[in-house]
Image: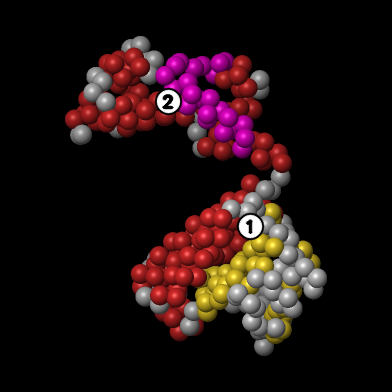
Amino acid sequence: MRSRQLKSGFKGEKMIVVPRGTTRKYSSHELVSNLYLTDIGFFPKALNHFRDRPLGCLEYILIYCLEGRGKIKTKNKKYKLEPNTFFIIEKDKPHQYASDGKDPWSIYWIHFKGINAAYLYKKFEKHNNSKPIFIPFHQNKVAEFEYLLDLFKMGYTDQIFEYSSMLLHKLLGSFIYYSIKSNDHNDRSRDDLAKQITEYLNSNIYNTLTMNDIISEFGKSSSTLFTIFKERTGYSIMYFFSLIKIQKACELMNLTTLSIKEISYQLDYQDPLYFSRVFKKFMGVSPREYKKSF
């Protein structure tokens, strides 16, 4: 027996359980098989909500707590779920969870599976040691759950399953992304620095910058700046600066009547021939060829 439960039916609850024959059908679908939900719901003020699954569940379970409190036990560990926190329970692992008797939780929850499901869980597990994660409340996140609930009220067509799969990637990705960012304060500081550098580069897009200018602006060594920026963006600082300059050049060619030479000067490339070489390096064609294509 996989599950025991207590107290079903909560005032204001919403729940969709996709017929298992339907989920089996889409488990081999070219797009949907990557990630799909089997159940989704909202339980408000779920007093006496309790689940005991000695054999685990066939799907991964995301529980997102909006209000109140509850507890989860899995893999010989106990966790408290509080407002604006979430937890993902691994598939096929024995677990229990229960709403608090005095301050019952209000939760959105999703059962999901698919080719990408294990990878998403591992990201959650790796970066947070499988503990509940705080995630800032945003009405858009609630709206995404509600949209999925409404979507499946329309039936179980190919289009609905395909669209829901893409929406589920986005929804779970937003939780996993915050999960990774919340890992520790040092990571957030590095993210902030990379963002500040990016903003500084964009604000100087019409100027010439050297690495010394950037070192002076941020008061850190060249190696520190290089390492943090490369980790966060995948690019070196000066390569990224050239990249956004060329992106701006493309924008100016598309939206203005400026000549290539004028654009070169506007972006502070004083040698138009050098500008052309840099442009071709990034775009694969010369500025003149690029402009002709429009």
Residue nearer the viewer, 56 or 205: 205
Looking at the image, which residue is at 36% across and 73% down? 158
Image disc number at residue 155? none
Q: CA distance from mark 2 to mark 1?
A: 35 Å
- For the N terminus, the quadrant is bottom right
Q: Quadrant of residue 50?
A: bottom right
Q: Is residue 61 among what the camera can see?
A: no
Q: Which residues are magenta?
A: 191-213
The vertical placement of 128 against 20, above or below, is above
Residue 285 at x, y percent in the picture:
26, 30
Chain-order first, disc 2 or disc 1: 1
Q: Which residue is mark 2?
A: 242
Q: Is residue 244 among what the camera can see?
A: yes
Residue 154 at x, y percent in the picture:
40, 75
- Helix, strand or loop status at disc 2: helix
Identity of the residue furthest to the bottom in this view = 1
How is the structure coloured here? secondary structure
Identity of the residue furthest to the front in this view = 11
The vertical placement of 133 against 279, above or below, is below
Residue nearer the viewer, 93 or 191: 191
Dot 1 alpha-carbon crowd within 10 angstroms: few under 14, some 14 to 19, many 20 or more: many
Image disc number at residue 124? 1
- For the C terminus, the quadrant is top left
Dot 2 alpha-carbon crowd within 10 angstroms: few under 14, some 14 to 19, many 20 or more: some
The vertical placement of 82 against 53, above or below, is above
Looking at the image, which residue is at 57% across and 15% down? 212
Q: Main secondary structure of the magenta part?
A: helix
Q: Amino acid at mark 2?
A: Ser
Residue 283 at x, y percent in the picture:
32, 32
Q: Amino acid at mark 1?
A: Phe
